[in-house]
Amino acid sequence: MINDIGLDDMIIDEKTLEEDVLKYWTIRTPSFSKVRENELMGDIGQGWHFALRSTLPFNRYRKILDVGTGTGFFSVLLGRDGYRMTGIDLTPAMVEEARREAKKFNSKAKFYVMDAQELEFEDESFDAIITRNLTWTLPDVEKAYQEWFRVLRPGGRLINYDANYANAIEQGNVPRTKTGDSVAYGHQGVTEEMSRLNEEITLSMPIGHRSRPDWDKEYLESIGFKRVFVDMDEAENILGLKSDPAAPMFKIIANK
């Protein structure tokens, strides 16, 4: 249960980074779910929907894996259009919320508790993989990218939206607590203490100290992805004034 996990129990240690991430996002689940639901129903949600449909035409990419689905935002968004969506997340509380959101918004997406770095799927299982704000939280991004390559069919596509949040922390430009049930993007319900813990986790991740997204592009190409390119504008245009100038969100498209 969320209330059984105390913030004081979260000790940042390289050997337990994944456990720390799990605890943090379990605590964040209720407020995070509300933010994503507001986003789903507003202009930002419409922007994401258009962007995904444009990059993943239905006639080519019908079976999609949503890695780090959180409360199911992308899976619900595309599941309503008939895409065969499978969402996975390390945090059981997030998966429970995702299932509720799918039912509420009439999406047939399926959700499972699973580690993005150790997928429980057969080779070449999916036409596409989408992920948002996940790779910065992974202790072993190289392993995750290799797994994602494995489960993509030949001709499949990876879309990764992320940002270098460690850079924002190092610059001292981090958004603090926001409150209010109408918040559609940001850190609603995050206390100062939780913000500090999040910063510690972020700075402990090796990926946060790499030159992104250049590093991602180079690594993806090294493991076999082709036609890898980076878009620095799309996500920023969707988010508008809610984007973080210290950690601009990028989009990576990579094809198998």
Image: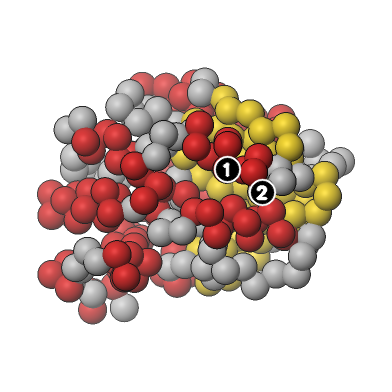
Q: Is disc 2 surrounded by few (<14), some (14 to 19) or many (20+) residues within 10 Å?
A: few
Q: Quadrant of the N terminus?
A: bottom left
Q: Position of residue 208 (x, y in %)?
A: 35, 44
Seen as rendered, the residue at the extreme front is 222
Q: Position of residue 213 (x, y in %)?
A: 49, 33
Residue at the image position 47 percent from the left and 39 percent from the top: 162
Query: Can residue 241 be seen here?
Result: yes
Position of 90 compared to 102: left or right? left
Residue flagged by tag 1: what amino acid is it?
Tyr
Quarter location, residue 151: bottom right
Considering only vertical position in the picture, is 93 above or below 185? Answer: below
SS for callout 1: helix
Q: Which mark is residue 175?
A: none
Q: Position of residue 92 (x, y in %)?
A: 45, 72
Query: Can residue 98 be seen here?
Result: no
Q: Quadrant of the C terminus?
A: top right
Q: Is disc 1 surrounded by few (<14), some (14 to 19) or many (20+) residues within 10 Å?
A: some
Considering only vertical position in the picture, is 156 above or below 28? Answer: above
Where is mark 1, residue-wise? Answer: 219
Say whether marks 2 and 1 touch (CB < 8 Å): yes
Quarter location, residue 108: bottom right
Considering only vertical position in the picture, is 144 above or below 210? Answer: below
Residue at the image position 46 percent from the left and 50 percent from the top: 134
Residue flagged by tag 2: what amino acid is it?
Ile
SS for callout 2: loop
Where is mark 2, residue-wise? Answer: 223
